[in-house]
Amino acid sequence: MQTDDESKTLLRKFSDRSRKSVRAGKHYLVPHKFTPAGEVIDKSNFNPRRDLSRLNLDDFRLLAALQEKKWDFKAACESVGQDVEKAERRYKKLSYFEFEDKKSQALAALANPAFVTAQNIEGFYTDQLSDGHRDHLKELAKITGSYKPTTNINVNHNVVQFSVLGPEEQKRLKEIGDSWQEAQIAP
């Protein structure tokens, strides 16, 4: 029962918008994000033999530990209780994910507000940005926080306050109102 919970947790950890990891029997299929040349994988360049990792639960555990320990192999082996010499083969199998992690971090560091602004200004002056480039720049701007939400709220609060009248003033006001009403009724 514990392995089912653990496998679901690991599947959620390695599934995101760019990939969906699945369990197939005792193995887990984890698609790659990049080709070995560093290009983003899409339908046109997807090769199942090259771009899918078939992992067992121990591989998955070691992969999670490697990411937590910032790819320190010995510390990861100690945290999951695997022998370092036996885990060498697993580490070679998981070396792609270290490359993927470093590539993702490098791409994330590149897309900062200054980069988005520079690309936008360059596109404004040269007007050579395609629609796809514009869409990507908009998404990067949202991700990096270049668009700051601004909300303007105008509140008008009008309150009419009547002063408190004394008994004499109330009596006089009533007399004026009654006389006005009588004048309206009389032809």
Image: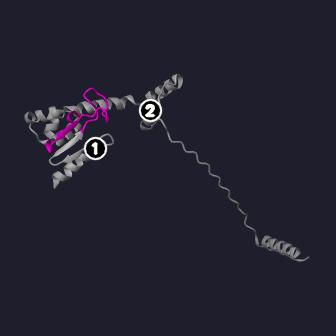
Q: At which x and y percent is residue 67?
A: 23, 37
Where are the magenta residues, as a range?
31-58
Q: Which residue is mark 1?
A: 20
Label 2 to label 1: alpha-carbon separation: 25 Å
- Residue drawn at x 44%, y 32% is 132
Residue in the picture at 26% in, 32% down: 100
What's the residue type where badge 2 is placed?
Answer: Gly
Left or right side of 187 for 45 = left
| Dominant SS type (magenta) | loop
Asked where in the image residue 57 lies, by quadrant, the reply is top left
Q: How is the image coloured?
A: one colour
Residue 41 among those drawn in magenta: yes
Please, what is the three-letter code of the amino acid marked with disc 1? Lys
Residue at the outermost front position: 44
Check if residue 99 falls in the magenta segment.
no
Q: Nearer the viewer, residue 37 or 180?
A: 37
Q: Is residue 173 visible?
A: yes
Report which quarter residue 108 is drawn in. top left
Residue 30 drawn at (x, y percent): 23, 40
Q: Whole-percent x and y of residue 3?
A: 16, 51
Q: Nearer the viewer, residue 79 or 34?
A: 34
In the rendered structure, find residue 132 and report the number of the disc placed on it.
Answer: 2
Q: Residue 152, position in %: x, y?
A: 58, 45
Residue drawn 72% across and 66% down? Answer: 164
Contact check, label 2 and label 1, Cβ < 8 Å: no
In the image, 115 versus 84, the foreground residue is: 115
Task: Check disc 1 and report its element: helix, strand or loop.
Answer: loop
Quadrant in the rendering for residue 160: bottom right
Residue 10 visible in the picture: no
> In the picture, which quadrant includes the C terminus?
bottom right
Instruction: Using residue 20 as the reference point, say whether residue 82 is left or right of it.
Output: left
